[in-house]
């Protein structure tokens, strides 16, 4: 099963969507559980979810390597897509049971906490908790409906011969059966589809980075390896543009009011103090706390951040945690420093926590990128080489036969650095746009709706309930302060942009007669631009000289 799971999730080939087609798995043992799922909307209206789910049978989940199973009380799952399907089923049943007292489906309004909630943690019945726990352990995930369960493994193509678009995607399971919930999952699934091109291009870039850092590359090596890398970066930029377009379509069929009042409550994190996962023998156990399905559990952006060296990757997180510890010591100096340190520490902890909700192959893939050199590392390495060549070219004792090739190397290396920075910035700007759109969506779908609902509650005399709603709405379905986290992502991304002259073309091309056959091709000495006195540029790099020099 481990081998087939690895091929089911193969980011290097398929991005983060599964390799095998998703489908709703059915067997006789699951009949009454699937029937309960089918009746969830009606059960919610009748406020009878708890009674129905508590009376389901406790099933055994067995896998292909377990010899014996009873087809009436056992569910045999031989393929990874079958495991994912049943995991999603039990994840939805668990979410329905836990949130049954805080969601009123008929009106789409959050109700006051029940007396049962006040008395202690919710106890998830064994008929749901036992299979869910076993599946989560087998899949290497947490026992709650996660992003992979409600998005990555929860769709199929209507027509397999047509491209993956929202109109050609059918969502397999939802809580509410509403158009808004289905559209919400569809948009995320298609975003993952477009993101696959960015991930496969990232793999090629990381392979190139690894080879370049095995031994220190020379100018000729960079001439050969940078142009294909720039093309890969352009492919990542195009993929991010498509992701941005798709994210912008969220409002087409997912209504803000429906998402906030009807869909979002079912996807929320487990309420305090957590949920008790009862076993066959006992329910006297400690409550467990898990976060709900969230876009923060998607693996696309962590991979892009690792490749581009954005400030919350693995290496940067370690440095940031060190700074946070230093900020802790300085808490008495200023409250601003203390608050920033606390917020940043929560941000880093949330990033680490979300990894546990990703399929293990996704986690390992992100770690591979984080443990490799980033594009920023490469640019620093090239600029170091550029400075060495520049220093060598300033040696006036060099013979002309030696000086001219050195000068040519400096200019070609400068060209490659500029082209790489331009492509880097192009993709990074799309990353920033995506995160800005994400912030805009959270404001309109959560923050604004919470204010509207709170005002309505206050007008009806439930001021305390309104304030409680506003407090809860400051956290996303993943249980974190999404506004701080998303804006921090944007700040980290912006800080990585390279400065290029705004009043000049950042990547000037030679006249038509000097057009290079390819990005990394070499120009003859006679076609090089006139070089000013090198003493005037002794403290800068040739990449800066290249973008500021006009071709003669």
Image (cartoon, rainbow, N blue to C red):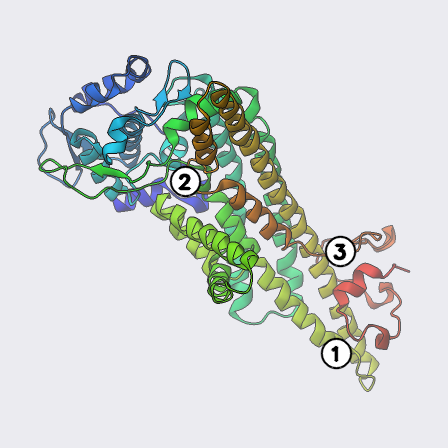
- Going from N to C along the chain, the mark reached first, 3 or 2, is 2
Mark 3 nearby-residue class (10 Å; few <14, some 14–19, many ≥20): some
Q: Please give the name of the residue rendered at 40% of the width and 44% of the height, measured from the top-left corner.
A: 10
| Res 376 quadrant in image | bottom right
Is 16 in front, or is 491? 491
Give the mark nearest the N terminus, 2 or 1.
1
Residue carrying label 2: 479
Label 1 crowd (10 A; few <14 / some 14-19 / many >=20): some
Rendered residue at 43%/35% (across/down): 472
Q: Do we see residue 161 in this rendering? A: no
Residue at mark 3: 500
Helix, strand or loop at label 2? It is: loop
Q: Quadrant where the C terminus lies? A: bottom right
User: Which disc, if any, is residue 391?
Assistant: 1
Label whose residue precedes the other's in the sequence (1 or 3) = 1
Pick the residue in front: 28 or 101: 101
């Amino acid at each position: 099963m481990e081998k087939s799971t690895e091929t089911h999730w193969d980011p290097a080939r398929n991005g983060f969507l599964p390799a095998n087609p998703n489908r709703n798995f059915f067997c006789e043992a699951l009949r009454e559980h699937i029937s309960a799922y089918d009746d969830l909307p009606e059960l919610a209206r009748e406020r009878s979810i708890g009674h129905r789910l508590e009376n389901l049978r406790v099933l055994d989940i067995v896998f292909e390597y377990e010899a014996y199973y009873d087809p009436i009380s056992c569910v045999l799952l031989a393929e990874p897509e079958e495991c994912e399907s049943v995991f999603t089923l039990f994840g939805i049943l668990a979410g329905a049971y836990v949130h049954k007292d805080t969601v009123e489906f008929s009106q789409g309004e959050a109700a006051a906490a029940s007396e049962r909630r006040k008395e202690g943690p919710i106890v998830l019945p064994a008929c749901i908790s036992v299979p869910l726990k076993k599946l989560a352990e087998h899949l290497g995930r947490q026992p709650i409906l996660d992003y992979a369960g409600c998005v990555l493994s929860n769709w199929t193509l209507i027509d397999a011969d047509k491209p993956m678009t929202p109109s050609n995607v059918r969502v397999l399971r939802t809580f509410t059966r509403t158009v808004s919930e289905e559209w919400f999952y569809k948009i995320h699934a298609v975003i993952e589809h477009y993101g696959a091109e960015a991930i496969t291009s990232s793999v090629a870039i990381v392979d190139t980075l690894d080879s370049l850092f095995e031994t220190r590359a020379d100018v000729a090596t960079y001439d050969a390896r940078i142009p294909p890398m720039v093309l890969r970066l352009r492919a990542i930029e195009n993929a991010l543009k498509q992701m941005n377009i798709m994210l912008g379509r969220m409002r087409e069929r997912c209504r803000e009011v429906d998402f906030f009042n009807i869909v979002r409550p079912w996807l929320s994190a487990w309420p305090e103090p957590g949920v008790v996962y009862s076993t066959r023998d006992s329910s006297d156990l400690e409550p467990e706390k898990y976060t709900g399905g969230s876009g923060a559990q998607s693996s696309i952006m962590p991979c892009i951040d690792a490749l581009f060296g954005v400030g919350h990757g693995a290496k940067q997180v370690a440095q940031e945690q060190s700074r946070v510890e230093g900020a802790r010591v300085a808490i008495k100096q200023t409250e601003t420093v203390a608050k920033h340190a606390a917020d940043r520490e929560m941000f880093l902890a949330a990033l680490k926590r979300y990894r546990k909700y990703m399929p293990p192959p996704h986690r390992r893939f992100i770690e591979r990128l984080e443990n490799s050199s980033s594009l920023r590392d490469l640019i620093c390495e090239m600029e170091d080489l550029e400075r060495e060549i520049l220093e060598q070219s300033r040696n006036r004792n060099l013979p002309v036969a030696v000086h001219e090739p050195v000068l040519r190397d400096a200019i070609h290396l400068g060209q490659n650095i500029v082209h790489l920075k331009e492509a880097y910035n192009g993709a990074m700007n799309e990353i920033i746009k995506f995160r800005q759109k994400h912030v805009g969506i959270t404001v309109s779908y959560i923050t604004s709706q919470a204010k509207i609902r709170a005002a309505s509650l206050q007008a009806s005399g439930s001021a305390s309930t309104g304030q409680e709603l506003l407090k809860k709405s400051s956290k996303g379905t993943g249980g974190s302060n999404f506004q701080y986290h998303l804006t921090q992502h944007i700040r980290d991304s912006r800080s990585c942009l390279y400065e290029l002259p705004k009043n000049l073309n950042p990547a000037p091309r030679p006249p038509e007669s000097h057009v290079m056959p390819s990005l990394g091709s070499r120009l003859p000495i006679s076609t090089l631009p006139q070089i000013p006195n090198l003493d005037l540029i002794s403290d800068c790099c040739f990449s800066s000289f290249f973008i500021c020099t006009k071709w003669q």
